[in-house]
Image (cartoon, helix red, strand yellow):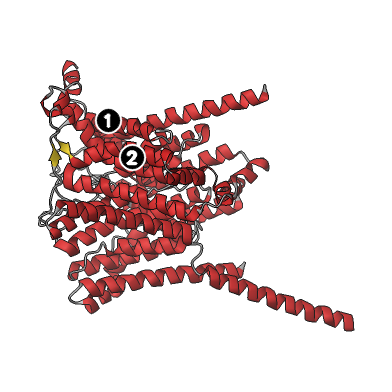
Amino acid sequence: MNKRVLFETIRTLVAIGVALLLALIIIFSVSDEPGYALERFLLGPVTNLRNFGNVLEMAIPLIFTGLAISVMFMAKQFNLGAEGGFFFGAVGATALVLTFNLPPVILPVAAIIVGALAGGLGSALPAVLKARMGASELVSSLMMNFILFWLGLFIINNYFRDAMAGAMASHRFPDAAKLTRILPGTRLHFGIFIALAMVVVVYLFLYRSRWGYALRMVGLNIRFAEYSGINTKSVILYSQIIGGMIAGMGGTVELLGMYPRFTWFQLPGYGWDGVIVAIMARNNPLLVPVFAFFLAYLRIGADIMARVTDVPSEVVAIIQGVMIMLVTAERLLAGWRHRMVVKEKMKAAEAAEVEGGGVQHG
Amino acid sequence: MGSLFDIIFSANFGYAVLRVTTPILFASLGALISIKAGVVNISMEGTMLTAALAGVAISAYTGSAFGGLVGAVVVGMLLGLLLAYFALNLKTDIILAAIAINLMASGGTVFGLFVISGDRGISSSLASKVLPRIQIPILHQIPVLGPVFSNHNVLTYVAFISVALVYILLYKTPLGLRIRAVGENAHAADSVGISVKKTQYIALIMSGAFAGFGGAFMSMGYVSWFSTNMIAGRGFIALAAEALGMGRPFGVLLTSLLFGSADALANALQAFRIPSEFVQMVPYVVTIIGLVVYAQRKHSAAQKVRQEDRA
């Protein structure tokens, strides 16, 4: 077991190393001041508190969508609707905080619940179609992303739009709705605690509950799960709905923590980032915050670099892609792993022989 | 509502349907070939986007629209090759590898455009070329048919002709037989000496080539520039079109036309007092309804078989 963890760790490090090496090559080939660009990229996020705060702020939505995707991927449900769920959750929360006048604490809590329900609603349709009729959740969830986006815009534009605002935007949120800032000098908000609490909740759900057990069994082998009496259809349903709910929560927390009003007029992209985080974390909820932080660090580093040098921040997209490809490449380093296993078995066999011999002589 | 019918039954609308169907049709033919070989290629979106940029950049660099087209198709094939290498040699889950390609494409094209031209988001400073439109003699003069079918971009004709070519490839050639055999049952195909890996490589590279054509059409026909995320989900809609086309080239043609019509309808409806958000939703809603209908039919067919088994 430990060998496997060691192997996966090394493979992840190799993937990250290769991706960063590639970034290095790209930066050196496009930049006139590569040394400075690289220094800003790698060290920029830790040079001052504000930058580091930016990293932590960005990690919050990534933790939520990473968890959402992890739950769905662990059940081998390729629902890619976290993007739409995240957006639509934020729309639901906007509707709530602009409609009901509730006291502080209660208002954000209610908003998060409504956001979760809205996000769950978004992923429910692909889940039902998959469970009832075997329709591919992959395609339908991708379509739902676009539908939820336009539906959300319709709701904001027609019911909550602030006509006085220059650009398209909702009315301002009441102060009671906002999540408290917790670190002076940054925008880091209370949402980080909610995100970390969700990490624990999702971990307990997956590894300490019956539902989570059934979910993992379906992910490992759906036929075996079916034969051992697990209701696989309900797993297909609740794994995706829970995933959508977590994404919706994330959208709400991001919106109430970071924005004074609803101003998203394109999909924010955190759903896709969640796929990256979940893959790097091998769907393990406890690793999700680690890789959410890592990805946020890369992003903020690239932004800082793009601000002060001639290298565009989109270089990160290439790093991400290479990392995912290499991390998921089963055969990468497989030869080395094979030799490791063989060596271990040989040693064990030798030890057994020596021991067995000893017994005979004794 | 009368004027809506006027719009739908006008030659302009027919022309628009064929025009917006073109990229979807290319991508769904590509998806069809890969799925026939038993490998799902969901990187059509990213491949089209990358090819669209390659077409613009190479046509501006070489001064030739044809050069741009060739470049776009080659880039599409290379991405198909990349996906094949990771999925078939390194055993990456093909869905995840394709997601990686899509993610790389959406940021990587922005990066690439900036490096090539210094432009952000849209290729305004690249003097890229446009593929020619073709007037079909005789047909051109016939009323109704002429305005609908003539004067399209050359790639629109290529797309529709490709339907027949893909049909011939899959059902009338040895390679097509191998592709279908591998997709039906890889073990059985292997046992009669077909190289499964090689066949899937070929299928993925071909699907990349089709995505390349689709991308070239977007940036050198549909419009005459490259812009960020200009594929706007067409690569994903194509996956739905493939699924609904029941694995047949002509089925794929019909479903692509259906989605193309929904797209064209969305454009046409913008003149009416329907909220534009709902109009924008039309193609995606149609896709989901189509998926449901298709799944329902498959589901009830399977149940029928089961009942007959029991009887």
Is residue A55 at least partly visible in the picture? no
Q: Position of residue A360 (x, y in %)?
A: 88, 80
The foreground one among A98 and B196 is B196
Q: Residue at x 22, y 31 (%)?
A: B17
Q: In the image, what residue type sits under mark 2?
A: Leu
Q: Quadrant of residue B217?
A: top left
Q: Position of residue A183 (x, y in %)?
A: 32, 64
The image shows residue A193 at horizontal and vertical percentages of 42, 57
User: Can the viewer see residue A214 in this picture?
Assistant: yes
For disc 2, the marked residue is: B165
Question: Which quarter of the picture shows residue B10?
Answer: top left
As helix, strand or loop, the secondary structure at mark 1 comes to helix
Q: How far separated are the C-alphas under marks 1 and 2?
A: 26 Å
Q: Can you give x and y, in whole percent of width and height, for residue A132 in the image?
A: 52, 32
Residue A196, by quadrant, is bottom left
Q: A28 above or below B91? A: below
Q: Chain of mark 2?
A: B
Label 1 packing within 10 angstroms: few (<14), some (14-19), many (20+)? many
Q: Residue furthest top?
A: B2
Residue on which disc 1 sits = B262
Name the kind of residue labelled 1 in the image: Ala
SS at mark 2? helix
> Residue at 33% of width from left, 36% of height from top?
B164
